[in-house]
Image (cartoon, rainbow, N blue to C red):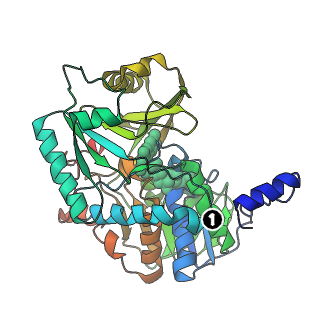
Amino acid sequence: MRYSGLRVLAEGLRGNRGWRPAWRKPAPRPGYDAIIIGGGGHGLATAYYLARNHGLTNVAVLEKGWLGGGNIGRNTTIVRANYFLPGNSEFYSFSLKLWEGMERELNYNVMHSQRGLINLFHSDGQRDAFARRGNMMRAQGDDAVLLDREGVRRMLPRLDYEQARFPIYGGLYHPRGGTARHDAVAWGYARAADARGVDLIENCEVTGIDIRDGRVKGVQTTRGAIWAPKVGIVVAGRSSQVAAMAGMRLPIESHVLQAFVTEGLKPALDHVVSFGMGHFYISQSDKGGLVFGGDLDFYASYAARGNLPMVEHVMEAGMTLMPMIGRAKVLRSWGGIMDMSPDGSPVIDRTGVEGLYVNCGWNYGGFKAVPASGWSMAHLMATGQPWHDAAHFRLDRFRTGRGLMDEEGTGAQHNLH
Ligand SMILES: Cc1cc2nc3c(=O)[nH]c(=O)nc-3n(C[C@H](O)[C@H](O)[C@H](O)COP(=O)(O)OP(=O)(O)OC[C@H]3O[C@@H](n4cnc5c(N)ncnc54)[C@H](O)[C@@H]3O)c2cc1C
């Protein structure tokens, strides 16, 4: 069933009786050509591109909960391509191009809104670093505009410009950056993958990975054993646990990241803003709520809820940047389990087991990566070769030290990326 404005009108006139479920609820079959573990954004996009780009439709996505219940439905929805280092920058640039065609491609409204992202800077040194980043972005075909303080003030009049401690010197404006409705991205990929024949199996937890003679043979699940010659581990914050089922120890730590949303307000913030002197980022949702987040909770955990000291830390940063935020009531906060890598960059790679692939290490920024990650993982699983824009995301860089992409320059400490 194709979605369209005309269809909405027609269904409205017919009492909305013609809508069909967006995807089937199949029982698992005994085997598939490929299995994806994890029905988050990356897993669903991988399944979709396996079918769309490689004609592989005998594929199952196994999800232990419900589709979209993980980080894909918990993030602060920022989509951008403003990376600095080769390796990351071409990948996110490719991803943003896929975002720009996503709604048409999936026939699904993911509410992608390119309202622009402004990274604020608060010192001469920070301005130089952002100017350099902006030049790198432009050199590879993305957009970046360096704004001075007055330029920022015109676009973001409600920030505190009189703040003595962290004065706003200016900002790096990335006009094609913005937001999207996070869970709609999961639903859009799920529906499109299902339409091409992929089985999406919810409430199906993978509990073991079957390996014989160095080759993957299938998986054990709470709904029985399923065989497959190719298995992709795409489970974000649970990556270390699932990889351990194959005897692997990944260089990933799992940490909680919280997010917050206020009551709906009249339009107050037209762009996404990132505070340069604290880890704080904020945008206003289409419903009017201010959506914001900050740092990780700074200890490894699998609890998808956060602690109070970090709530205070995030609120302090918000008040410093934008004191009007103190008048708004926070409606909800929640947490997600982040797959933090030591250099802040992801992994899309083969493993030591033939037919077993891993996709993880998305740190703070895996939402914007969903389309390119799915595309690259599908390419790797179908052809055995890395997609060229994701060729740097190798697992062995943590063993050899070659090719590390420490975007933040914070060294090998997971919780600082
Ligand atoms: C609060 C917060 C804010 C964020 N903000 C942003 C942002 O603004 N921009 C951005 O780009 N990124 C952001 N991110 C990061 C982004 O959301 C993640 O990097 C990305 O969603 C992770 O990939 P995923 O969607 O595949 O993960 P998930 O949705 O977590 O998918 C993994 C799935 O695997 C399933 N699974 C786990 N173990 C098993 C098993 N054994 N068997 C079967 N299934 C299993 C889980 O149930 C889950 O559904 C944020 C994350 C959080 C938590």
- Give the residue pinned by disc 1: 107
Q: Quadrant of the N terminus?
A: bottom right
Report the front residue among 22 and 120: 120
* 4 relative position to 173: left or right: right
Above or below — where is 118 with respect to 132? above
Q: Residue at x 45, y 52 (%)?
A: 367
Q: Residue at x 50, y 47 (%)?
A: 71
Above or below — where is 109 with respect to 336? below
Residue 169 sits in quarter: top left
* 188 relative position to 257: left or right: right
Determine the secondary structure under disc 1. Answer: loop
Q: Residue at x 28, y 61 (%)?
A: 89
Report the front residue among 225 and 57: 57
Q: Is residue 355 visible?
A: no
- Coordinates of residue 95 in the picture (x, y in percent): 40, 63
Report the front residue among 391 and 367: 367
* 11 relative position to 325: left or right: right
- Coordinates of residue 296 in the picture (x, y in percent): 36, 36
Q: Is residue 183 visible?
A: yes
- Coordinates of residue 84 in the picture (x, y in percent): 22, 56
Above or below — where is 28 with respect to 381? above
The image shows a total of numbered marks equal to 1
Q: Quadrant of the C terminus?
A: top left
- Coordinates of residue 354 in the picture (x, y in percent): 42, 78
Residue 192 sits in quarter: bottom right
Type of amino acid under label 1:
Asn
